Amino acid sequence: RREVTFSFDTQKYNLRAVVASMLLTSGDVEELSILHEVAEFAASRCRGRPALVNKRWRNQGLRPNEQAEAFRRLYGLFVDEVVAKELGCSNGLVYQRQPVLRCHTPGSKALGHPHRDELYNRQPWEVNIW
């Protein structure tokens, strides 16, 4: 496989706004770029990363609530209308309902090592979308 960059309508698929509403009490999209400076996240760190981000993402995604449902609807549309088209899949895709959110902050070390998912027994036809 080769790495490909594609464009999409960020207004129609405004995943940033939905993620901000799930993570931040303010819901301010602009705070996502300075998440490591937001007081509620800066105080809680795990291996150099905001631990509260990971906890809140998992909790919000697992509980039935308005923000999680809004995310799943928009994410589903994005996969069906953008990703499937880019991958040339006319019969639909199987995808992870609640994707993993990786939050890397300035000055933190990368966890793990560079790898290919096949090394962890993932199926070779799986694709990561960044």
Image (cartoon, rainbow, N blue to C red):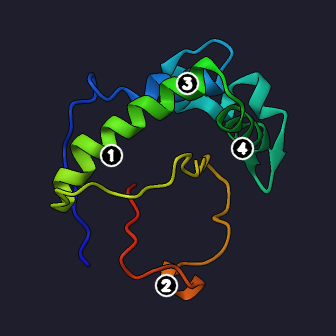
Classify residue 68 as left or right of residue 71. right
Query: Given contact means CB atoms under 8 Å apart, are the residues at marks 1 and 2 in contact?
Result: no
Q: At label 1, which amino acid type do we have?
A: Val
Give the crowd class for mark 1: few <14, some 14-19, many >=20 residues within 10 Å. some
Which comes before the other along the chain, label 1 or label 3? 3
| Circle 3 crowding by C-alpha within 10 Å: few under 14, some 14–19, many from 20 | some
Which mark is first along the chain, 3 or 4? 3
Q: Looking at the picture, does residue 28 appear above or below residue 96?
A: above
Q: Position of residue 29 (x, y in %)?
A: 49, 20
Q: Position of residue 94 (x, y in %)?
A: 40, 58
Reading the image, the residue beneath label 3 is: 20
Distance from disc 1 to disc 3, alpha carbons, whole Å, reads: 19 Å
Q: What whole-number distance in Å separates the C-alpha atoms at marks 2 and 3?
A: 32 Å
Q: CA distance from mark 1 to mark 2?
A: 22 Å
According to the picture, the residue beneath numbered tag 4 turns out to be: 54
Q: At which x and y percent is residue 105?
A: 62, 46
Q: Is residue 82 above or below residue 24?
A: below
Task: Say what amino acid the circle numbered 2 marks.
Answer: Glu
Q: The residue under label 4 is which amino acid type? A: Asn
First reached walking from the N terminus: tag 2 or tag 3 = 3
96 lies above or below 124: above
- First-in-chain label (1 vs 4): 4
Whole-Å distance between the Cαs marked 1 and 4? 23 Å
Residue marked by disc 2: 118
Is label 1 or label 2 in front? 1
Whether label 4 touches label 3, CB < 8 Å: no
Marks 1, 3: nearer the viewer? 1
- Mark 4 or mark 2: name the one nearer the start of the chain: 4
Q: Nearer the viewer, mark 2 or mark 3?
A: 2
Categorize mark 4 by other alpha carbons within 10 Å: few (<14), some (14-19), many (20+): some
Q: Which residue is mark 1?
A: 79
